[in-house]
């Protein structure tokens, strides 16, 4: 495969393929395993992820790349094969989460700042040697307007950090996935999500230009424009699509090859239906695909439930969701396909 940043970025979003976000930190994967009654150990985390990476139909036809956690990029499968080699053998690209998590932003209660810039140049060189050709950094922007969240300082600090991260990635020959996640956990309306997402993306692209990031060699990983969960409102896919695309047309440069959405707590089929509606109103200047964590993994986690005898069922559940999201990335998904499966 070409090592040019532009070619790697284009490959990540080509042909209706998308990313598997399997970069849960140890704390997050423990929460996911608690739900299915599985103890989180290095071994169980390896077995679970190996199950997905060996799902050959999903990995070769629908998943262009996998975002890994530091532990996983160094792990070997039960037979001794490095997990990275299993991903590459399927024709998929290994990636790595390089941020060190969102911490409270001093002086701004309710806001966070994502840390991890110190020593990043050296860590990226190490990850490149381990096979990573793209990376991910997630900034977290919560919404609680009554409390002044997010503050202008949160948006400025987080987007500045994203730009510094992206520039370091490109220096290392690694495509930066730039993830400014405006959370959908709050009670806000879809229009408030639009406003906060717009303020964040406008500032983000200012910072990326200032940092001399080559947009053609980057991918944006945003939230969709959607009502907060606590608002009690579920938006139609058409409304999500219309407001999301209106926002991106206003603020995301056409030089960006692709936009790979996070699922953010949407139900599995909801995330698929919304992505499909977004692509159904194309053509768009960028490829629009998925980089889902929960919306790709909730079903396989449940089907697997930590039992070796359930590996085939877990792989089937993963392959199904990957297939449905692949079709949505092409605007060809239909609800009946879920029932047929
Ligand atoms: C896979 O989840 C990632 C969470 O990592 P942490 O454990 O460090 O919080 C997360 O960054 C993920 O890549 C994106 O948020 C997208 O995942 P969802 O579940 O929102 O699709």
Image: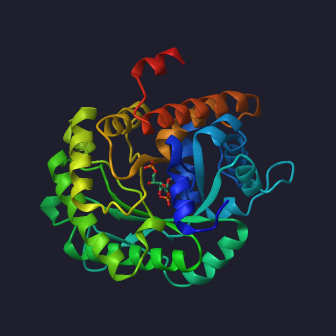
Q: Percent position (x, y) of residue 78?
A: 83, 48
Residue at 25% across / 50% down in the picture? 186
Residue at 25% across / 40% down in the picture? 240
From where the camera sits, is residue 267 visible? yes
Horizontal side of 27 relative to 238 (left or right) equals: right
Q: Percent position (x, y) of residue 155?
A: 27, 71
From where the camera sits, is residue 235 visible? no
**The image quarter in which residue 139 lies:** bottom left
Residue at 47% across / 40% down in the picture? 295
In the rendered image, the vertical position of residue 103 relative to residue 334, given as above or below: below
- The C terminus lies in which quarter of the figure? top right
Residue at 28% across / 33% down in the picture? 237
In the rendered image, the vertical position of residue 268 relative to residue 118, given as above or below: above
Q: Percent position (x, y) of residue 56?
A: 71, 38
Q: Percent position (x, y) of residue 252?
A: 30, 61
Horizontal side of 188 relative to 93 (left or right) equals: left
- The N terminus lies in which quarter of the figure? bottom right
| 284 or 103: nearer the viewer | 284
């Amino acid at each position: 495969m070409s090592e040019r940043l532009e070619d790697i970025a284009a490959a990540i979003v080509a042909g209706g393929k998308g990313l598997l976000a399997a970069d849960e930190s140890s704390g997050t994967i423990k929460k996911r395993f608690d739900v299915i009654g599985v103890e989180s150990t290095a071994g169980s985390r390896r077995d679970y992820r190996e199950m997905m990476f060996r799902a050959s139909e999903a990995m070769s036809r629908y998943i262009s790349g996998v975002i890994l956690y530091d532990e996983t990029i160094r792990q070997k499968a039960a037979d001794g094969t490095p997990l990275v080699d299993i991903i590459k053998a399927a024709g998929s690209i290994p990636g790595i989460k390089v941020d060190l998590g969102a911490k409270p932003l001093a002086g701004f209660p309710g806001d966070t700042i994502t840390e991890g810039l110190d020593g990043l140049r050296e860590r990226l060189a190490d990850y490149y040697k381990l096979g990573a050709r793209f990376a991910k950094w997630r900034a977290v922007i919560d919404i609680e307007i009554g409390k002044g969240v997010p503050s202008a300082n949160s948006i400025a600090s987080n987007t500045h950090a994203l730009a510094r991260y992206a520039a370091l990635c490109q220096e290392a020959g690694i495509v930066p996935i730039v993830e400014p996640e405006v959370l959908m956990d709050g009670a806000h309306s879809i229009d408030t999500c639009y406003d906060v997402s717009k303020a964040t993306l406008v500032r983000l692209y200012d910072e990326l230009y200032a940092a001399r990031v080559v947009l053609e060699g980057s991918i944006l990983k945003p939230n969709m424009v959607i009502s907060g969960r606590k608002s009690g409102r579920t938006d139609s896919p058409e409304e999500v699509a219309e407001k999301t695309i209106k926002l991106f047309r206003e603020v995301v440069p056409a030089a960006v090859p692709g936009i790979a959405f996070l699922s953010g707590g949407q139900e599995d089929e909801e995330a698929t239906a919304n992505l499909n509606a977004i692509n159904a109103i194309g053509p768009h200047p960028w490829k629009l695909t998925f980089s889902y964590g929960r919306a790709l993994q909730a079903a396989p986690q449940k089907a697997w439930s930590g039992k070796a005898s359930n590996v085939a069922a877990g792989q089937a559940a993963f392959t199904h969701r990957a297939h449905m999201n692949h079709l949505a990335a092409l605007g060809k998904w239909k609800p009946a396909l879920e029932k047929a499966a």
